[in-house]
Image (spheres, rainbow, N blue to C red):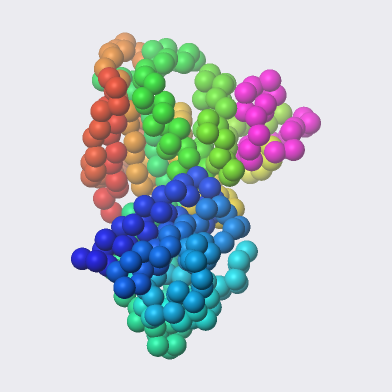
Amino acid sequence: MKDQKYLEMAMDQAKKGLGQTWQNPLVGAVIVKNDQVLAKGYHRRFGEKHAEIDAISHLKNEKEATGATIYVTLEPCSHQGKTPPCVNKIIELGFKRVVIGQIDPNPQVSGKSVERMKQHGIQVTNLDNSKSLNPAYNFYFKNGRPLITLKYAMSLDGKINQKSGYRTKLTGKYTFKDTQKLRLMNQAILIGENTLKIDDPKLTVRTNPLFPPYRVVLIHDSRELNLQQSIFKSEGPTYILTNYKNEQHLPENVHVVVDETWTPKKIIDFLTKQGIQSLLIEGGSHIHADFVKSGLVDQLIAYVAPKLIGGSGLPSVFGQGISEMLDFKIEKISQLGSDLKVFAKRVY
């Protein structure tokens, strides 16, 4: 019971790094000795010290670590990255015990640190219950591609706008706040050509995180881009996936990638090579349909507004059909003001 209590404390620490760790996982750490918490820490920012070292830095004296237990939400790293291996410091300071929330799925680490610590006489316990902190990180290393979430707002009759070619505002301010948090939790956002032209979105996170998500736009001909649109007037890495080479002068943060035929698989392969672990597909309905047909949807978030559109309103997923339905399990339904949020996970 005590182990679980301290690990939950470490998980609370880890969550403080949300939106700042980029392609590194959220990690928290708590140092305990004689049932007293001596220090806490977390991975604050990509490229900076990891949670274990952050916690150690808050000790009054490093000698306090001798004989202590450190609770870490993820197996300590054992390789040299932007920072030295954390496992070295844990061994050097003489920790008696290490309790982890899960094995690191990254093959550079996976199980290696646990073995090293055991070889040096450190007791290691894996509670295996902190995977909820980093679902995309875990998915990426298990499946070799990003975790893909389909997101849309719709009316009670499943429509996303009243009339083709025009934007319809459906949801309220609480849903807007939730979508901002959703963007913060993803490393890339994908939209199509119609969404770019009709909605003119910035695809930014209003809190201005240090590492904003990649903005990815699928467009037929980059030569026809309207550079007065909002997406070209804000900072953050932007990728235009197109069939034709660009002939305009674009901002430095905008990159054009050409392929004769962009398919969902090619898009995902491209993002995987960029190290992107999570993709949020915001629209439109034809891109939704393409990804559904390809089977490349892992999670779905639908915001349902208490409105009826009827008539010829555009459905949330519209395009090529599929021979077999995709099965999902509804994980949570929550109220956001007058709207409903439905979160579902794919059943494989």
Q: Residue furthest front?
A: 60
> In this orientation, which residue lies closer to the viewer: 316 or 21?
21
- Residue at the image point whose x is 39% and y is 80% from the top: 67
Q: Quadrant of residue 259?
A: top right
- Residue 139 position in % (x across, y down): 40, 57
Q: Please name whichever residue, 224 or 335, is drawn nearer the observer in this view of the structure.
A: 335
**Vertical side of 120 occupied by 144: above or below:** above
Residue 10 left/right relative to 191: left
Query: Which percent across, then down, holds residue 293?
Result: 38, 41
Q: What is the tally of numbered marks visible in this picture?
A: 0
User: In x, y percent, where is residue 272?
Assistant: 54, 54
> Image quadrant for the C terminus?
bottom left
Question: In the displayed structure, does residue 220 sit left or right of residue 16?
Answer: right
Residue sitting at 49 percent across and 66 percent down? 60
The spot of residue 165 in percent (x, y) is 49, 15
Position of 196 relative to 138 (above/below): above
Q: Quadrant of residue 337?
A: top left
Q: Nearer the viewer, residue 194 or 12?
A: 12
Picture quarter with the N terminus: bottom left
Range shown magenta:
225-253
Q: Residue at x 62, y 28 (%)?
A: 231
- Determine the main secondary structure of the stretch shown in magenta: loop
Classify 129 as above or below 236.
below
- Is residue 315 shown to the viewer in this render? no
**251 in magenta:** yes
Q: Residue furthest left?
A: 1
Does residue 162 appear left or right of residue 267 in this picture? left
At x 33% / y 57%, what residue is drawn?
9
Q: 79 or 88: which is nearer to us?
A: 88
Q: Is residue 19 left or right of residue 307?
A: right
User: Is residue 232 inside the magenta stretch?
Assistant: yes
Q: Can you see residue 198?
A: yes
